[in-house]
Image (cartoon, rainbow, N blue to C red):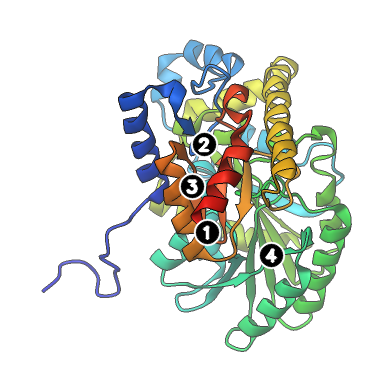
């Protein structure tokens, strides 16, 4: 006998990231933090190895009236000024001509999950990268949605042919395509598509949409840590040429942008050529928001509005210091990886660098060997993720060489 729904998967969730984080914490307690390389944490940390909480963000948040913090938002779709500011922020410096709407969500995760279930029925298939944030697959699985994976890379470039091949396979069993791309600053490889790659992807979307609707979910969680912020949204202009049977939903994360991971604030931005199509998706998302989380934090929305309007320049200046720091960290690791002949996926910007490990069995053996040498990383499909976002420069020096030595000894 079981009390839960018959289709439920009752296998306990195993969050491998948090399990490894816990191992690293215990190792630090035993042998001292200075002797442990903890490259697991996917949040921004300073050179003092402490979580970064932007002063501009939290000094103002602390000053917000308690009643504002206690109050419900004015709407379950998000406060109107927040929704407007999200659009202005997401599309800044890009001339995006598509019709659009914004729905507030609990972080980028809420936007991803809601988008998947807005466009796919149970039993249908979601297309995701083969190297990706693990929760995409979990979100699909929990809603009885299948997944199909496209190969992320062809050499050092985005593998558009694999995307095409995967789409063709999915089309054999359903009459729509819903695909996830995590760009720019891909988690976990740090890749960002070129404008030309985006143009080719849009061309493919238009080609496919001559037969069936095509919905692209673009997870931009890390976009505000691009090395080229002024140009970071320009790729969105390629969407202007989308056909009427293609749509984009952008999953935006205030959590990452503001270093406010626990406040759970984000948005789904729906874009399409026709206002009626955007409105249709919006209606479904409105209902899902009301039925699932009802409301997101009122003060978190108010803080985002203030930071991106009245305090914009100071906020950007504080954040830029950490973008520069991550660029230093990633450049150092990549330089030493190249010298040590340690293979990594093509990295351009963002929180993570990922080692190439095509064989997952070999990867797991190597991952265990690293931990025995007090180096903690995260296993991903076909790779080992190194979180340069949380690793201080002093611990990056020499790390790639050590990792290569361990790799050679593990074979």
**Label 2 secondary element:** loop
For discs 2 and 1, the disc positioned in front in the rendered view? 1
For discs 4 and 3, the disc positioned in front in the rendered view? 3
Circle 1 residue: 411
x, y (%) of residue 78?
54, 39
Circle 3 residue: 378
Q: Badges 3 and 2: C-beta atoms under 8 Å apart?
A: yes
Circle 4 residue: 277
x, y (%) of residue 299?
49, 25
For discs 2 and 4, the disc positioned in front in the rendered view? 2
Mark 3 vs mark 2: which is more N-terminal?
A: 2
Q: Which quadrant of the structure image shows residue 173?
A: bottom right
Q: Residue at x 73, y 46 (%)?
A: 347
Relative to 242, residue 92 above or below: above
Q: Residue at x 48, y 13 (%)?
A: 62
Circle 2 residue: 39
Camera-side residue: 136 or 346? 346
Q: Residue at x 65, y 50 (%)?
A: 189
**Label 1 secondary element:** loop
Q: Badges 2 and 4: C-beta atoms under 8 Å apart?
A: no
Camera-side residue: 203 or 44? 44
**Label 4 secondary element:** helix
């Amino acid at each position: 006998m079981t009390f839960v729904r018959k289709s439920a998967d009752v296998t306990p969730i195993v969050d491998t990231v948090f399990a490894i984080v816990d191992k690293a914490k215990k190792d630090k307690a035993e042998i001292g933090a200075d002797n442990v390389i903890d490259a697991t944490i996917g949040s921004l940390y300073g050179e003092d190895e402490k979580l970064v909480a932007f002063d501009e963000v939290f000094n103002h948040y602390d000053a917000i009236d308690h009643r504002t913090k206690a109050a419900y938002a004015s709407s379950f779709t998000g406060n109107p000024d927040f929704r407007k500011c999200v659009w202005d922020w997401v599309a800044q410096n890009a001339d995006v001509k598509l019709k659009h709407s914004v729905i507030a969500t609990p972080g980028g995760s809420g936007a991803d999950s809601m988008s998947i279930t807005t466009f796919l029925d149970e039993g249908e298939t979601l297309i995701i990268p083969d190297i990706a944030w693990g929760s995409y697959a979990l979100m699909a699985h929990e809603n009885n949605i299948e997944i199909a994976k496209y190969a992320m890379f062809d050499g050092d470039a985005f593998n558009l042919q694999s995307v095409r091949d995967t789409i063709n396979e999915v089309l054999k069993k359903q009459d729509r395509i819903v695909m996830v791309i995590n760009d720019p600053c891909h988690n976990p490889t740090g890749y960002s598509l070129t404008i030309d790659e985006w143009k080719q992807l849009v061309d493919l979307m238009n080609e496919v949409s001559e037969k069936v609707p095509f919905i692209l979910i673009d997870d931009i969680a890390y976009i505000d840590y691009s090395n080229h912020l002024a140009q970071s949204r320009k790729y969105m202009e390629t969407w202007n040429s989308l056909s009427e049977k293609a749509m984009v939903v952008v999953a935006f994360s205030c959590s990452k942008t503001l270093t406010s991971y626990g406040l759970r604030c984000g948005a789904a931005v729906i874009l399409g050529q026709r206002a009626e199509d955007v409105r249709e998706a919006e209606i479904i998302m409105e209902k899902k928001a009301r039925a699932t989380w009802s409301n997101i934090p009122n003060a978190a929305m108010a803080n985002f509005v203030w930071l991106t309007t009245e305090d914009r320049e100071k906020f950007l200046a504080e954040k830029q210091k950490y973008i520069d720091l991550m660029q230093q960290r990633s450049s150092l690791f990549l330089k030493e990886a190249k010298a040590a002949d340690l293979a990594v996926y093509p990295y351009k910007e963002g929180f993570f660098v990922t080692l190439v490990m095509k064989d997952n069995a070999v990867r797991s053996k190597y991952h265990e060997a690293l931990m025995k040498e007090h180096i903690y990383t995260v296993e991903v499909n076909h790779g080992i993720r190194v979180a340069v976002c949380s690793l201080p420069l002093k611990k990056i020096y020499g790390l790639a060489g050590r990792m290569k030595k361990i790799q050679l000894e593990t074979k």
